[in-house]
Amino acid sequence: MTKNKDEEKGLTTYNDQWAKENMRLGMSGVDPMDIVPPQVLLVQKSSDVELMQTAQGEQPKLGQFFHTGRNKIMASFEAYFIFAGKGTYVNRRKKGEPVEDQYVCVGYMVEDMSIFGYKFRSSALRSLSPLFTAVVAQNKPMFIFRCTVTSKMLENKDGKWWIPVVRVGEIETNGERIAELEFYAHQYEDKRERKIVEVEEDAPPVKDPAEDTATPPPDGKEDVNPSDIPF
């Protein structure tokens, strides 16, 4: 590895790379499940777009994604999914407050390796099935697949809504990046035995059958359910 002039002189360059390398310094005793990553939200009719603004004041349109950590609007994005946990939540938005299934995921953006969280609920519950299938079909870990996430509009008598579509792409071949992804994946996988039930925040009823909400991911998750792998 070639050193720059500052490194040769024993000087430290305090840049983004330095910040990333020292990001977890002092947090070795913090449970990864207690760190709520920024969310990627799929904008629906019921979404509060007033809270979703870029630095330039732009707001996302229906069917677009919004990254709450970077305040960025995206039509689609590429990501590695390092963790997927199936659990339940109490949906207070529906009559009778039913307990429903959800997948809570943690991923890293291919673009800059920034962490994010995503919830797959209702009509989007099986959006990750293509990724689960690729894992068992190719005998490779989930986190090395580069996935492209886009949105698709659905419609019924209650109206229109959008769901995420996950397309599995190429396998990552960069050894350093694979090692980094593996490290992060183990941090979450080692905590998988913890499980709680999440309660949906109070909110007025909505007509959208499937809605992405801005609530943080739950503290507990469980393993991928084999029944969600479609064969």
Image (tube, rainbow, N blue to C red):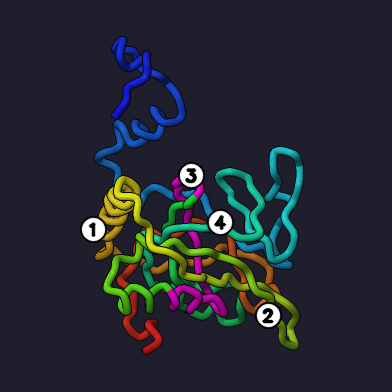
Residue highlighted by disc 2: 154
> Toward the viewer: 203 or 100?
100
Quadrant of the image containing the C terminus: bottom left
Residue highlighted by disc 4: 40
Mark 1 belongs to which amino acid?
Asp
Q: CA distance from mark 3 to mark 1?
A: 25 Å
Q: Nearer the viewer, mark 4 or mark 3?
A: 3
Mark 3–mark 1 CB contact (< 8 Å): no
Question: Magenta stretch: residue 113 in it?
Answer: yes
Label 4: element kind = strand
Mark 2–mark 1 CB contact (< 8 Å): no
Q: Residue at x 63, y 45 (%)?
A: 71
Indicate which disc, 4 or 3, sits on the residue closer to the N terminus: 4
What's drawn in magenta, residue-wise?
111-130
Mark 3–mark 2 CB contact (< 8 Å): no
Q: CA distance from mark 3 to mark 2?
A: 31 Å
- Position in image of residue 146 (x %, y %): 44, 61
Label number found at residue 112: 3
Label 1: element kind = loop
Label number found at residue 190: 1
Label 3: element kind = loop
Q: CA distance from mark 2 to mark 1?
A: 37 Å
Indicate which disc, 3 or 2, sits on the residue closer to the N terminus: 3
Q: CA distance from mark 4 to mark 1?
A: 24 Å
| Badge 3: residue crowd in 10 Å (few <14, some 14–19, many ≥20) | few
- Above or below 159: residue 115: above
Q: Residue at x 38, y 62 (%)?
A: 171
- Position in image of residue 45 (x %, y %): 73, 67
Query: In the image, is 11 to the left or to the right of 214?
Result: left
| Badge 2: residue crowd in 10 Å (few <14, some 14–19, many ≥20) | few
Q: CA distance from mark 2 to mark 4?
A: 20 Å
